[in-house]
Image (cartoon, rainbow, N blue to C red):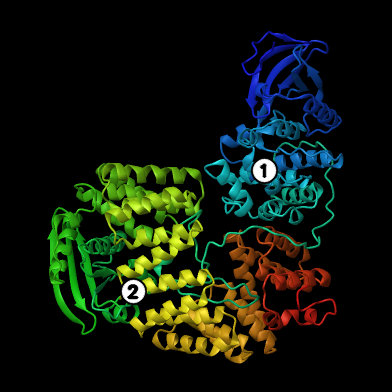
Amino acid sequence: MTDTSTTIPGGERIGDFQIVGKLGAGGMGVVYKATDLRLDRTVALKFLPAELGVEEKEKESLVREAKAASALDHANIGVIHGLEETADGRLFIVMGYYEGETLAHKIRRGRLPLQESLDIACQVARGLCEAHARHIVHRDIKPSNIIITDRGVAKIVDFGLARVISSASSSQSMRASGTAAYMSPEQAMGKPLDHRTDIWSLGVVLAEMVTGCRPFGGETLTGMMWEILNKPPSSTDNLPPEVQPIVYRALAKDPSQRYANCEVMLADLERVRKELPADARPERDVDVTASLRSPGFAEAVKNASQPSWNQSGVAVAQKKVHWWYVIAPLVVLVLAAGSLLIPSIRDRAAGALTAGGEKHIAVLPFDNIGNNPANEPLAEGLMDSLAGKLSDLDVGGKSLWVVPTSEVRSRKISDPTSALRELGATLVVKGSIARDGQDVHLNVNLIDTKNLRQIGSASLEDRAGDLAALQDEAVSRLAKLMHVNVTADMLKNTGGAVTPAAYEGYLTALGLMQRYDKPGNLDQAITALNGAVKADPQFAVAYAKLADAYRMRYGLDPNPKWMEEAAANASRAAQIDSHIPAVYVTLARTHAMQAKFDLALQEYQQALQLDPHSADALVGLAGTYERMGRLADAESTFKKAVALRPDSWDGYNSLGLFYSRRGKSTEAIAQFQHAIGLTPDNAPAYLNLAAVYLDMGDPKQFSAAEQALKKSIELSPSYPAYANLGLLYYNERRYADSAAATEKALTFNDQDYRVWSNLVAAYEWLKEDDKASVAREREFRLVEQAAKDQPQDATAQSELAGLYAAQKMPDKALLRIQTALALSPDDPRVLVNIGDAYEKLGDRPNAVRCVQKALGKGYPLDDLKSDPDLQALLQDPKFRPNGK
C-alpha cells in the first residue's frame, strides 16, 4: 500500500509513472515530480492527504471537478492530464510539470516591483476569466497555487481541489490554516460561493505582491477571520496609487460591491499596466492571450452590510459640514495598526488646566545658547527628559502634576503667562543649555505663573559633559524649591549607571522624535539610540525608547521588521530592569499596534502595579478596553484616572470624550461642564462642550453651542473654534456669517480640505461664484493629496469623486466612487458624497439610490436640504424623503 504521508522514494513506480522526487506538500496534498512512462514526459502527481479519508461520494465529486478542470485550455492555467488511482484505491491527479517557482517563493524574497506584480496579476486574471466563463470557481487562489515559469508565465494550479477537500475534511483548522489569509468574508463564514470569491483572493495576492505584506493578519486563525470580516485591509497604505482603487474594490466585504466579474478587474489591471512609463514595463512580453474589454464601472449601488469598527472619537457624517473636537493628549490612544487615531478633523489641542491647589508644572522649551543647530535636538530632548523626571516625583501621595510636553509644544507655549492661561500651569520651569566642547552649562528657573515671581534657580556645570548627573541635580534643586522630598529611587529611572555619551545620545533622540514627521529625523533618532545602548548596554530606558522609535517607524512604513525590532528592544529593556513603568507602557503600545490586545492589557497592568499614578498606563489601559469592546471596563478606568486627580480638568475631558464616542451626549456634556467648573477660563473645554451640542443635531441646542464657541474664542481664538462657528452659522442658514467665520479659521490653518469644502458651500448659497471657484480649486488640491496620503479614508475618496465629476472627469470619478464604496459601503456621509458625484455625472437614478440609502442609515434630511448641489435631486419625483 502506497502511503503518501511519507515521502515516496525516487525511482519507485506507481502505475505508469516513475517517481523522480518530492516537489512539495501542503493542505491540498503531496506533489511529486514523475515521468509518464507511456508518453515519455515529465509530469506532477498530486496525492490527496493520506489522513483525509475521502469516501466514494467525495471521490465522485473529485472526478467531476478534475474532468471540468481538465477541459480548461488556457496559457495561464496549469494543465490537468487526468485522474488516476493506485492499486490500494488512492486517487492522484496528473498535472503538467513546469520549471519555475511558486509566487509564494518569490514574495518571500521581498515585495515585487509594480510592473512585475501587474504582469502576474493580469495573467492570473486572464486564467480566472477563462475558468469563470466555464462556471468553474477555483476557491483557493493564493501565491502557493500560482507557479511562475522560467519564461515568466503565471500558471494557476489546483483548480477544483478546494471544494472537494474542504467538503471531505472534518478539520476546520486544516482547511483554513494555509488559506485563511486569502479567504473572502463569505468563504470565512461558510456561505455559498461564486466567482467573486476568486476576485477577493486575487486582490489579496495583488496587495501582497506590491507591499510584501498580507492585508489581513492576526496571530491566530480566529483573529485572522475577525480581521477579514471586520477590518479594512491593513498594510495597504504602501500601495502604489495606481493600484489602490483596484485592490480596495476587489476587497469589498460585500461581494456586490466588488468587481462584477473578472473581466472588469482585468481591464483595470491592463489599463494601469499600459499607463506605466515605458521604462517601467517588463522587458519580456509574454502574449498569452488577448486582453478583454471592460464593460465599465457604472454599476448600480446595491444595499450592502459591511461590518465596521469605529476606532476613533465622535465623528458626524455629514455632507460639507464637519465638527471639530479638541482632544486632550491623554486620550490619543496609541493602539492598532498605525495607532488608534482620532480623526484628522478633530483638532488636537488641550492642556492641563486646573483651579485646585496642586502644583501644576509646565517645562518650557530650553534655550539653546549660541544657537548651534547641533545642540537643538539636545535642548528638545532635555525638555522631555526633565519633565519625565519631575513626573516621577509624584509618589507617596505628593500632589505634583506635570503638563505633557506635547501640549506645551503643540500650543507653542514659551512664557509663564501663556502657560497659566492656556495650560493652567501654576509653575513653570524655564531653562537654557550651553556647551563648549565637553563643558556643559545647565540653567533652570522655577517661576510662579500667577505673580511671575522667580521662586528660585540653579546654575549647574559639568566639564565632562555628564548630562545625566546635571539633570538629576537640577531635579533635586527644583524639588526642594517645591518642598518635595527626593530620594535616590526617584531619580533612578534610566535602568543603569548611564555613561555621559549614552545619555547625550538618548536626549538627542528624544528631541528628534518630537518631530518624527521631518524626513530623516526618525532614522537619526534610531541611530542615536542604537549608539546609546551600544555605549551603555544596560541603558534600559534607551532600549524602551528605541522600541518606541521602531514602533513609530512602523507607523510610517508598515514593514513587519520594524515591529520585530520594536518588540525585541522592548523585551530587552524589561530584561535589564523590570521595575521601570515606562518599559511596560512601551511593550503595551507595541502589542496594541499589532492588535494583540490581551498582551497589551497585561503590560499596562504591570506598569500600573509599579506606578498606580501612571497617566500613560491608565489611559492606555482604558483605550485598550474600549478597543476590545469592554466598554464597562474602559469607563471605570477613565473614571479611575479622574479619581486620581479630581481637581484636574483633563480627566473629566477624557471621560467626556469617551462618552462622546459612545454617543452619550448627556453624559459627555456633564463631564465637560465639570471641567469648566474647575477651570472657568478653559477654552478647550468650552470647545468640546460646543462640539457635543452640535453633534446632537438638535437646533434647540445651537444657541448653547454658539455661546460656548464664542466663549472659547474670547479666551483663546483658535482654528477649530472658528471652523465650528462657521459650521453652526451654515446650519442656521446664516451663510454670510458662516463664510466670515470659516475664512477666519483658514487664517489659522489652511491645509484641511474639509474647511475649504464648507467655505465652498457657503459661497455657493451666497451666489459668490468667483470666490467659490477659487475655494473649490484649493479644496481639490488638498483632497487629492489627502486621498494619496490616506488611501483608506473613504470620505476623502468620495469627496474626490464629486470634485472629479464636477470637472467632467467621469472615469476618474467612477473609479473613486468604487473605491469609497469598497472601503465604507454603509457610511451615510460617504453615500451622500457619492450621490452628489453621480448627480454631477448626470446619473440621477444612482444618485437617488445613494442618497436614499444614506437617509436609511441615519443621515438627516435637513442636512440634505442644506446642500446646494442636491437641490434638484430633492425635487425629483422618484426621491422619497423617508428614505424608503
Task: Looking at the image, tell me whether mark 2 or mark 1 is earlier in sequence order.
Answer: 1
Question: Vertically, is 98 above or below 451?
Answer: above
Q: Are marks 2 and 1 in contact (CB under 8 Å)?
A: no
Q: Position of 684 compared to 344: left or right?
A: left
Q: Which residue is drawn at the image coordinates 54% and 45% (left, top)?
A: 218
Q: Say which of 662 and 26 sits in front.
A: 662
Q: Amino acid at mark 2?
A: Ala
Mark carried by residue 195: none
- Secondary element at tag 2: loop
| Image quadrant where one finds the C terminus | bottom right
Residue linked to disc 2: 352
Q: Say which of 804 and 839 sits in front.
A: 839
Label 2 environment density (alpha carbons within 10 Å; few <14, some 14–19, many ≥20): many
Residue linked to disc 1: 183
Q: Say which of 466 and 496 sits in front.
A: 496
* Percent of width and height locating residue 838: 77, 70
* Percent of width and height locating residue 709: 48, 86
Q: Position of 463 compared to 261: left or right?
A: left
Q: Which residue is drawn at the image coordinates 67% and 73% (left, top)?
A: 858
* Percent of width and height locating residue 24: 64, 23
Label 1 environment density (alpha carbons within 10 Å; few <14, some 14–19, many ≥20): many
* Percent of width and height locating residue 72: 84, 32
Question: Vertically, is 625 above or below 711?
Answer: above
Q: Position of 505 compared to 447: left or right?
A: right
| Image quadrant where one finds the N terminus | top right
- Secondary element at tag 1: loop
Let me know if residue 748 appears in the view. no
Q: Amino acid at mark 1?
A: Met
Q: Which residue is drawn at the image coordinates 38% and 68% (left, top)?
A: 639
